[in-house]
Amino acid sequence: MSDEKRQAKVSLPERTHPATAADLEALLFVVDRPLTRKEAAKLLEADRAAFDRLVTELQKSLTSRGITLLTHGDELQLTSGPGQARAVLAWIGTGGSDMTAAPLETLTVIAYRQPVTKAGIEEIRGVDADYGLRVLLERGLIEEVDRLETAGRPHRYATTLEFLRKFGLSSLTDLPALEGDAESLLHLQLVSEAPGSGGAADTDDEGPSSPAGEGALAD
């Protein structure tokens, strides 16, 4: 398709009233990616103040429904509501996802301990994290956010907007509370991330490499 055809404008019906919260909901519903506030406001022909009112109105109208308006920085997207997190997690954990246990367990560690290094993940799980990190990075569920200022300056990983969308969370505060032994994950002191640590996992960290080892353990 030529650039000329891609840039061809659609003939829009004349706007007879200011944009509404329903217009914003419909726009976010049909777009398969997050929209910035600037993008959405331009499409709805609304100034910033009017658009902010639409966002507030939409958030209020969705409070009793199974979907919510996810905001992440300047981006907006519709997703399943935090009250439906258990149902969504149950679907993903019982066959709704083709991810094996290794990536899911790795994702859990990152979600609750972010930002965290590969060595930190391996210290908690007790197995190599290469495979899990590779899968999660490929699917856009995690990202490298910075480097830990210890020997080797290893990458630290955190979850993304796609993670929130996929799991039906409006923010990280909506993560289900950990219970029992799993709660210790929040308080575990990671030797590998302590100042002055210099284990092999921390040295010359270039992120995940071959997916071979842990995949075999998980399947």
Image (cartoon, rainbow, N blue to C red):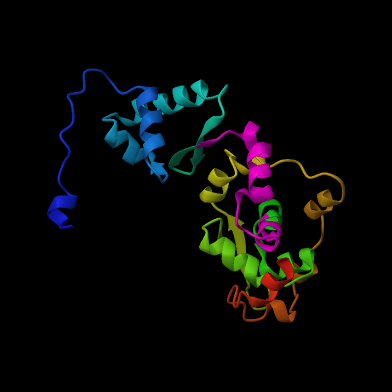
**Which of the pair 147/107 is nearer the observer?**
107
- Which residue: 62% across, 81% down? 204
Judge left or right: residue 139 versus residue 100: left
Hey, which residue is sitting farthest left in the picture? 4
- The answer to which quarter of the image holds residue 168 is top right
Q: Judge whether 65 appears above or below 122 on screen.
A: above
Does residue 148 appear in the picture of this structure? Answer: no
- Which residue: 70% across, 51% down? 112
Hey, which residue is sitting farthest right in the picture? 180
**In magenta stretch: residue 102:** yes
Which residues make up the magenta segment? 79-107
**Which of the pair 152/93 is nearer the observer?**
93
Judge left or right: residue 15 versus residue 144: left
Q: How many marks?
A: 0
Does residue 20 appear in the picture of this structure? Answer: yes
Which secondary structure dominates the residues rendered in magenta?
helix
Where residue 1 appears, x then y in whole percent? 18, 57
Quadrant holding the C terminus:
bottom right
Judge left or right: residue 53 versus residue 159: left
- The answer to which quarter of the image holds residue 41 is top left
Where residue 24 appears, x then y in whole percent? 37, 29
- Which residue: 43% across, 28% down? 55
- Which residue: 63% across, 48% down? 92
**In magenta stretch: residue 78:** no
- The answer to which quarter of the image holds residue 108 is bottom right
Q: Judge whether 114 appears above or below 195 on screen.
A: above
Where residue 124 appears, x then y in whole percent? 78, 63
Where residue 75 appears, x then y in whole percent? 44, 43
